Image (tube, helix red, strand yellow):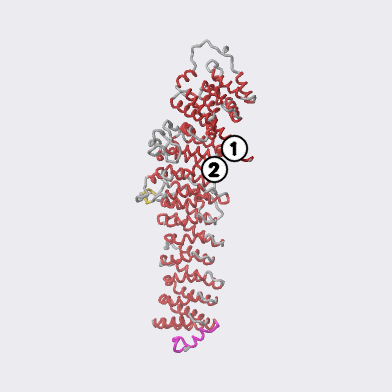
Amino acid sequence: MNAERDLSPLTPGVVRALTDKLYEKRKVAALEIEKLVREFVAQNNTSQIKHVIQILSQEFALSQHPHSRKGGLIGLAACSIALGKDSGLYLKELIEPVLTCFNDADSRLRYYACEALYNIVKVARGSVLPHFNVLFDGLSKLAADPDPNVKSGSELLDRLLKDIVTESNQFDLVGFIPLLRERIYSNNQYARQFIISWILVLESVPDINLLDYLPEILDGLFQILGDNSKEIRKMCEVALGEFLKEIKKNPSSVKFAEMANILVIHCQAADDLIQLTAMCWMREFIQLAGRVMLPYSSGILTAVLPCLSYDDRKKNIKEVANVCNQSLMKLVIPEDDEMDEAKPSMTIPAEPASEESLSKPESVTTGESQSELDVTALNKPLRFPYSCERIQVTLNLDGIVQVLDYHLSDTSIGMMTRIAVLKWLYHLYIKTPRKMFRHTDSLFPILLRTLSDESDEVILKDLELLAEIASSPAGQTEEGHGPSDGSDVRPGPVELHVPARAGQLSSSSTKGLECSPSTPTMNSYFYKFMINLLKRFSSERKLLETRGAFIIRQLCLLLNAENIFHSMADILLREEDLKFASTMVHTLNTILLTSSELFQLRNQLKDLKTPESRNLFCCLYRSWCHNPVTTVSLCFLTQNYKHAYDLIQKFGDLEVTVDFLTEVDKLVQLIECPIFTYLRLQLLDVKNNPYLIKALYGLLMLLPQSSAFQLLSHRLQCVPNPELMQTTDNTKPSTSSKRTAASNIDYTELLQHFEKVQNKHLEARHQRAGRAEQLDRRVVL
C-alpha cells in the first residue's frame, strides 16, 4: 500500500498507527485525524473532509484486516467530533460503515463500532433522526448480542438515541412504523425488551401520536405479552395499559374496527395473562365503540362464550367475558330487524341504550397489575361516548347464529356457555324476530335435542326460547299449518285460546295480530313444536320418564295450558304407537290432576260451564281413551259420574293386567288427595250422586284385596244412609243434574269411541305377544 499516494491527506505515521494492534496508538492517530479535519472545517474544505471520511470508510472500516477496521471506526468517530454541528452534512457517510461493523464476527470490533456510533450520534444529536430507521435496525440486533460488553455498549447508545427522540419534534413516525411492525415479531427476549422500551418512550412523547398506528403493532404486543421472562411480560403489560388509558381518553381517534379481530384472536389465547388482557380490551372496546363492534359479533362470541364456563381458577377471565357478553347483547336493537342486508346499511345511533338503562357489571380482581389491565373498571357503568354520532353498521345475523348453533351443538361445552347461547337466541328472537325466523328451521332440531340436557337451568332457558318461537307473530305462515316436516296434517276442529300470560313472552304487545284463525295467539311453529316434542318423548322414553312432567309443566307456565293439552291430545289421537300413546296420556293426566300450574284449567274442566270447556273435555277424552283408568279419572274430574260408571262397566270386557290394576290402585290413592276433596264431599249427597257411589264401588270390585282396596272400602263405609240425610226441601234440583242437562255432550258416542280405541290396544298387545312368542321359538331352535 502506497500511503503517500493512496491515503493522503493522512500521513504514513497516522496510517501505521490506525492499523496498530494497540488501542493507545490508534487513539493517538485518531487525535491527529481530528486535528486535520478541524483544519479542513476552518478552511471550509468540504471535498477534503469527504475524502478523509471516504478513506477511513473504504480503506479502514471496511477492510479485511481487523486492526484496520478498528482504526477506521475510531477515525470516523474522530471526524464526527471534529465536524461538530456540521457532522449532520456527512452522517450517511459516517454511519453506514459503522453499522456494517455491527455484523462483525469479532465481539471486540462490534463493541468499538458501538462506541464509535455513540460518539457520532452524541455530536450530531437531532441531525441523526433522518437516519433513525437504520440506527434502530442496527441497535435491535445488538440488543440480542451474546457478548455482555457489546450489549452494555448498545444500551448506552440506545439511551442516547431515546433522549434525542424525546426532545425532538421532528421524529418520522410514519417511516418508522413498518420497521417497528417487522421487529416486534422477534422471538429473542432482549430484542423484545428493546422493542417494548422504545414503544414506551414513543408513547410518552406528547408530540408523537402512536395510538394512530396501534393496529399495526397490537398483535405483536400481545405476542410479547406471552414471553417467558416475567420482566418482559411486565413491561409489555405496562405498555398495553398505557395504550388503553390513551384509548379511554381519546376514543374518537381510535381505530376500533381495525383492532377488533386482533383482540378476538388473543381472547382465545392459551396464556391466561394474554387472554385476560385481551378480554379487558374487548370489554372496553365494546363499551366505548358501541355498535362499531357489531359487525365483529360472531368472532367476539366465538372468543367469549367458552370463557363463561371457566371454573374459579380463571374467575377473572370469566367475569370480564361475562361483561363483554352482556354489553354486546345490548348492542342488538329492534332497528336491526328493519334493515335489509341486500341494501346499503342504515345509519343508526352508535350506542345501544342510555347509560341509565344499562346494568353495572361486577368488579373483578387479579394478581397482575390492575392499573394496566384496568380490571377494576368493571364496576363502572357502561360508557358510549358517541351519543350524537351516527355510524353505518350491519348486524351479521347469519354469522352470529352459526356461532351460537355450533356452541349449542358441542356437547363438550360447559353449562354456563349453553345458557348464554340460549339467552342470546332468545334476545335475538325478541329484538329481530323477522330475521331470526329465517333460521328457525335449522335451529329447531338442536333446540329440541337440548331438552335432553343434564341441567334443569339449560332446559328452562331452552323452553323459554321455544315458547317465544311458538308464540311470536313473526313466525306465522300464510298457510297456518307451519313449516312442512312430514308430520300429520293438522285437523280443522282444534281450537286454541289466548294465553293468560302472553304479554310476558315478548317485548311486543301485539301478539296475535298476525295469527291464523285456528291459532289466535300461537303461530305456525306452535303445532310443529308440539308434534316434535311428542316425537322426542316417543324416541327417548328416558326423557319422558325423568323430565317429561317438568317440561310440560314449564310450558304450561310459558304458554297457554289449554292450548298445550288441546294440541297434544289432538296429536295423540292419531298416534300409531299405542303403547306410547297410553304412557303419554297417563303422564298428561297426572300433570293435569296434580300440578299447581294447572289449577285454573282443572277448575274450567270441573264445571264444564262453557262451550270451550266442553270442547276441551271431548278432545281430551278421545285421547285419554288410550288409557282406561285415566279416562275414568277425567270423568271424575269433570263430575261425569254416570259416564264414569258406564266406563267401569266396560272394564269387564278389557284385558285386566298387573299394570292396569296398578293404575287403578294409583287412582284410589289420588281420590284421597286434596284435588278430589269436592268429590268426597259429594258422597254426602247420596240421592243426587248415585253414579259416583256406583263408580267407586265398581273400582272396589276391580281391586284385589290390597291396601288400596281397604282404603276405598273404608271410604265407602263412611257414606251415610240416604234416609238419614233427607231434608224437608225435596224440590230443589241438584246442581249436578242441571250441569249434566246443559252440557249437550253425546256420551253414547264417547263410549263407543272408548270401546273402539281399547279394541285397537287389545289387537296391538296380541300382536306384540305373538312376535315375542315367535322370537322365543327362534331362540330355542
Highlighted magenta segment, given as a residue range: 3-22
User: In the image, residue 77 lies at what x, y percent?
Assistant: 48, 78
Q: Which residue is mark 2?
A: 453
Kindly give the residue lying farthest to the front in the view shown.
781
The label on residue 692 is none
Residue 150 placement (x, y as % from top left): 54, 73
In the drawing, does residue 477 fall left or right of residue 232?
Answer: left
Res 406 visible:
yes
Q: For this rendering, which residue is in front, 697 or 233? A: 697
Residue identified by numbered label 1: 774
389 or 659: nearer the viewer? 659
Q: Is residue 20 magenta?
A: yes
Q: Can you say whether 773 is above or below 328 in the image? A: above
Residue type highlighted by circle 2:
Asp
Q: Is residue 509 visible?
A: no
Cα distance between the residues tagged 1 and 2: 38 Å
- In the displayed structure, 347 sits above or below 12; it is above
Residues 107 and 587: in front is: 587
Q: Is residue 687 magenta?
A: no
The answer to which quarter of the image holds residue 213 is bottom left
Mark 1 or mark 2: whose residue is earlier in sequence: 2
Of labels 1 and 2, the one closer to you: 1
Residue placed most toward the observer, 466 or 254: 466
Q: Which amino acid is tagged 1?
A: Gln
